[in-house]
Amino acid sequence: MSSWEGLNRRKFPRVKYPCLIVIHVDPEKSKDVVLTHTENIGIGGVCVVLKNALKMFSDLEIQLDLLDMEDPIKCHGKVVWCVQRQSTAEKKPSFYDIGIEYINIDDTSRRRLDSI
């Protein structure tokens, strides 16, 4: 078993569902905002792709737009894993898959996630 397969043991299943996510890396500093897309999503957390690594266990504020014509889901999150992807070309930067666990997500938002 590779180390990546070991990381794939989750409490909640994930699905490939493209949506947009805004991450406030340092909620005290409004300039530390990242807009990206999801790699996969579940009711317990989300995987995003970023150019830069995030520090393990960092507290984040996230806004998740499910592109379902409803307001974005807003909650806190915590970085629970970070894996650098293999670079496919010499001069291209490597990206990071980053797992974020939802913190204090409300029941209505969790039901919306469950429906997708």
Image (cartoon, rainbow, N blue to C red):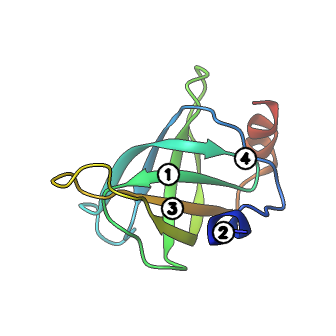
Q: In the image, what residue type sits under mark 2?
A: Ser
Q: Of tags 3 and 2, which is closer to the observer?
A: 2
Q: Which residue is mark 2?
A: 2
Q: Quadrant of the C terminus?
A: top right
- Residue 73 in the image: x percent, y percent? 60, 43
The residues tagged by marks 2 and 4 sit, at their Cα atoms, a distance apart of 23 Å
CB contact under 8 Å: marks 2 and 4: no
Q: CA distance from mark 1 to mark 3?
A: 5 Å
Q: Quadrant of residue 94?
A: bottom left
Q: Which residue is mark 3?
A: 98
Separation of residues labelled 1 and 4 (CA atoms): 12 Å
Mark 4 lies on residue: 42
**In front here: 7 or 52?**
7
- Measured as percent of width and height from the top left, residue 9 is found at 79, 64
How far apart are the alpha carbons under marks 3 and 2? 18 Å
SS for dot 4: loop
Regarding mark 1 in the picture, which secondary structure is present there? strand
| Mark 3 residue type | Ile
Reading the image, the residue beneath label 1 is 48
Give the residue type that dot 4 points to.
Gly
Q: Are marks 1 and 3 in contact (CB under 8 Å)?
A: yes
- Whichever of callouts 4 and 3 sits on the residue coming sooner in the sequence is 4
Q: CA distance from mark 1 to mark 2?
A: 21 Å
Q: Quick one: quadrant of the N terminus?
A: bottom right
